[in-house]
Amino acid sequence: MLEDDPLEEKPCTHAGAYTAHADRVRLVAAADTDTERLEGFSGRYGIEDTYEDYRKMLREVKPDIVSVCAYAPERHAMVMDAIGAGVRGVWCEKAFATSLAEAREMARAAGENGTALVVSHLRRWSGEYERAKEIIDSGAIGRLTSLTAHFSGSLIHTGTHAFDVLLWFAGDAEWVEGTLEETSGGDLPWEIAEDPGGRAIIKFRNGAYASVHGEGRDYFNFEFEVTGTGGRVRIGNNRLLELHTPEADVNYTGIRELTRKPFPPVERKNIWAGALTNLMDVMEGRGVNMNGPEDGTRALEVALAIHKSSRAGGRRVSIPLGGDSEKFRIRSR
């Protein structure tokens, strides 16, 4: 139904992306336990083969590609069943899983079965974020020193988007220190029944640090400030796109201050179309997977490390996680 939003750039859903690429792919079947939604979907897209049981759909339709758009607690079983049914490509919503054990099993199964799997951390296919990454990697803002991320609550559902961007920009994380907003316990000692917001410090292996602010707010917010020894980039929603580099200060002799400069030209790209095109290219042996299961696992791992640190009173937690951390499970949307 997001395709009905008059403000969103189209396509803005999995189904919208499929129908926009009718030259390469056909949308042939759908499964949903909500019969009213299923009927609305089938009517909108002209789908005759509809199922309340996705396993039956996999057996009877034998699709080449499957989109897994259910909430996070169901994604592991759906991805594993799709891979087991011989699906060639899986487009999985984020967060990739609810635990590291799930994520690693899914990544391993995809690799062993030759299944192309893309995780829907969509900013990887954004022209704006792609240009920001090029600026950072080119050294135009010097050596990377600090990153700041702001987003509106939920460290898994929203936060994995942010952690994926931070890891894309800065490389592998070394350790995390963090605290959560109020949470409720789950059925097990290592289970969290909710997906709260929180805040954290992340140390990257390249020496840079990130400050993360993912508290609940009365408005939507998603933005980054990336600072190096020679400049700064700001990027986020609502067309936030800024580049700052040093110039001679107008108030003090011999001092250089950051001055806003024109941002380099950006190619406008549809992120949903980009994700689907990337998946199909990987399935056909062309190109590199821009956000595969390993990337999805790393973003989830940072969020889970913040949970673990918070439970230990903000103690520093090293990455990669090990031991009982595999069992940490967050019931995210």
Image (cartoon, rainbow, N blue to C red):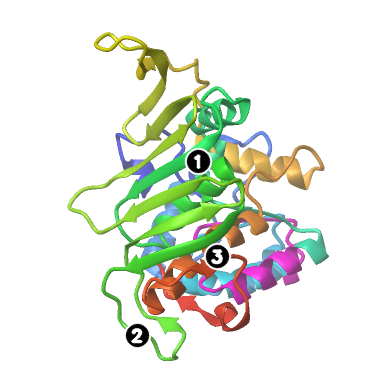
Q: Which residue is mark 1?
A: 123
Q: Is residue 11 above or below residue 111?
A: above
Residue 25: percent from the left, percent from the top?
Answer: 66, 42
Observer able to see residue 121: no
Could you tell which of marks 2 and 3 lies nearer the N-terminus? 2
Q: Amino acid at mark 3?
A: Glu
- Nearest the viewer among 145 and 327 is 145
Q: Residue at x 49, y 78 (%)?
A: 329
Instruction: Return the residue at label 3.
Output: 301
Q: Nearer the viewer, residue 188 or 115?
A: 188
The C terminus sits in image quarter: bottom left
Q: Which numbered disc, 3 or 1, marks the residue closer to the eye?
A: 3
Residue 90's x, y, as percent? 65, 57
The residue depicted at 77 percent of the width and 65 percent of the height is 86
Kindly give the residue lying farthest to the bottom in the view shown. 188
How far is mark 3 from mark 1, CA to CA? 19 Å
Q: Are marks 2 and 3 in contact (CB under 8 Å)?
A: no
- Do tag 3 and tag 1 residues touch (Cβ < 8 Å)? no
Q: Which mark is residue 45?
A: none
Give the extent of the magenta segment.
84-110
Q: Please state which of the two labelled residues, at mark 1 or mark 2, is closer to the viewer.
A: 2
Callout 1 amino acid: Arg
